[in-house]
Image (tube, rainbow, N blue to C red):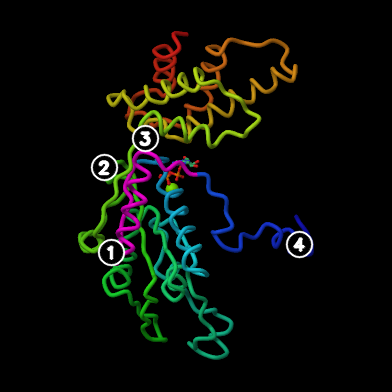
């Protein structure tokens, strides 16, 4: 295990001081520009928005980008995000008392460690509740007051009113996908701007793949088109596939192909293969975990079909 001194040194080297320092490579054409505009509208009118869309369509990156703009404009306004699930308790986002200090001094302010939601409320920052519909009803209920009144009660300490700039964004996968719970009606009623994201149009998705490729990985336009056709094919087959390949899968295939091309150029590959051979091999590795088939359907046979249809191999 890493020693204490080295840990402290590396930790401070790697610490992200605030989100405005992060280099977020984002494509803002198509649905993303519109979604950003809606986030802006929600912010300006004091309404809390939700981003709804299947896995990997860019909900998180859009929130991070939006939060980074806010940090730049408002200075020192923080960004916190948390992914919710059944195991999350209100104390995880509100905060909790340190047992050792509480034992000595009782339930005093000094003994309280604020959680991310309370921190965002006090600092006027942005709080992103990822997968908000996976939280238990109990946790969802704790969010009602911050959303409705911009205030929250802390056990033993009292209530606080949030800073005027506090902003709460929810993100979730559409409810019909298995594994997610329902958003309570009460919470639903308090979210007033619903921003839907889906798989982007072709031009936008290809731009996203390009922006995510390292510079030295050259993938030709015709190859990118093929990659898109593979990804898009998984989104067309709604009979066998419950969750198709996301943007992440396209990026992964492009990176793997880019590396093969790079090695070829450096003369480090024994023998080159055609793009069809490369892509049918790479797609198998990437798609295996990127597609969720409907019950009773084998993912391998879906992949074979996709490759056959798009690459003819
Ligand atoms: N508009 C975009 N510009 C640049 N990259 C994008 C864009 N949209 C998505 N991506 C890339 O696609 C990947 C998935 O995006 P992200 O993590 O934001 O999706 P998500 O909707 O939050 O997924 P999940 O539901 O799984 O949490 C990331 O690698 C991200 O960099
Ligand atoms: Mg996400």
Closer to the eye: label 4 or 3: 3
Above or below 123: residue 128: above
Q: Give the Cα distance between marks 1 and 2.
A: 25 Å
Q: Residue 195: horizontal and vertical position, in percent? A: 29, 49
Task: Find out whether the residues at labels 1 and 2 contact each other: C-beta distance under 8 Å.
Answer: no
Left/right of residue 191 with respect to residue 2 in the rendered view: left
Residue drawn at point x = 47 percent, y = 63 percent: 80
The residue tagged 3 is: 200
Start-end of magenta stretch: 26-53
Closer to the eye: label 4 or 1: 1
Q: Give the Cα distance between marks 2 and 4.
A: 46 Å
| Helix, strand or loop at mark 1 | loop
Q: How crowded is the residue under tag 2: few (<14 C-alpha within 10 Å), some, or many (20+)?
A: few
Left/right of residue 305 with respect to residue 3 in the rendered view: left
Q: Give the Cα distance between marks 3 and 1.
A: 26 Å
The residue tagged 4 is: 9
Q: Earlier in the sequence, mark 4 or mark 3?
A: 4
Residue drawn at point x = 61 percent, y = 59 percent: 16
Q: Give the Cα distance between marks 2 and 3.
A: 20 Å
Q: Residue 276: horizontal and vertical position, in percent? A: 52, 12
CB at disc 1 and ligand 1 closer than 8 Å:
no
Q: Give the Cα distance between marks 4 and 3.
A: 42 Å
Closer to the eye: label 1 or 2: 1
| Quadrant containing ligand 1 | top left
Is 144 in the magenta?
A: no
The residue tagged 1 is: 47
């Amino acid at each position: 295990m890493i020693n204490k001194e080295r840990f402290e040194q590396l930790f401070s080297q790697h610490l992200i001081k605030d989100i405005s320092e992060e280099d977020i490579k984002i494509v803002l054409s198509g649905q993303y520009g519109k979604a950003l505009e809606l986030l802006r509208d929600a912010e300006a009118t004091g309404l809390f928005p939700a981003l709804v869309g299947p896995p990997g369509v860019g909900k998180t990156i859009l929130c991070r980008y939006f939060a980074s703009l806010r940090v730049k404009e408002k200075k020192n306004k923080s960004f916190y995000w948390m992914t919710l699930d059944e195991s999350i308790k209100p104390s995880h986002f509100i905060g909790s008392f340190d047992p050792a200090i509480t034992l000595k001094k009782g339930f005093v302010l000094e003994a309280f460690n604020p959680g991310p939601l309370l921190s965002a409320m006090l600092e006027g920052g942005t709080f992103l509740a990822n997968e908000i519909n996976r939280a238990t009803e109990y946790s969802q209920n704790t969010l009602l007051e911050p959303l409705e009144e911009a205030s929250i009660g802390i056990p033993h300490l009292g209530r606080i009113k949030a800073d005027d700039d506090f902003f709460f964004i929810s993100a979730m996968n559409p409810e019909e996908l298995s594994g997610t719970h329902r958003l309570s009606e009460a919470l639903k009623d308090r979210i007033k701007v619903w921003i839907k994201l889906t798989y982007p149009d072709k031009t936008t998705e290809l731009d996203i793949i390009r922006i995510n490729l390292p510079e030295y990985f050259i993938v030709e336009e015709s190859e990118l088109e093929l990659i898109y056709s593979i990804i898009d094919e998984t989104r067309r087959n709604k009979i066998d596939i419950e969750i198709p390949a996301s943007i992440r899968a396209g990026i992964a295939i492009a990176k793997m192909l880019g590396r093969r091309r790079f090695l070829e150029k450096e003369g480090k590959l024994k023998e080159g293969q055609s793009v069809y051979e490369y892509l049918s091999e790479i797609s198998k590795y990437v798609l295996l975990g990127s597609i969720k088939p409907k019950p009773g359907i084998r993912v391998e046979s879906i992949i074979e079909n996709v490759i056959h249809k798009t690459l003819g191999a």
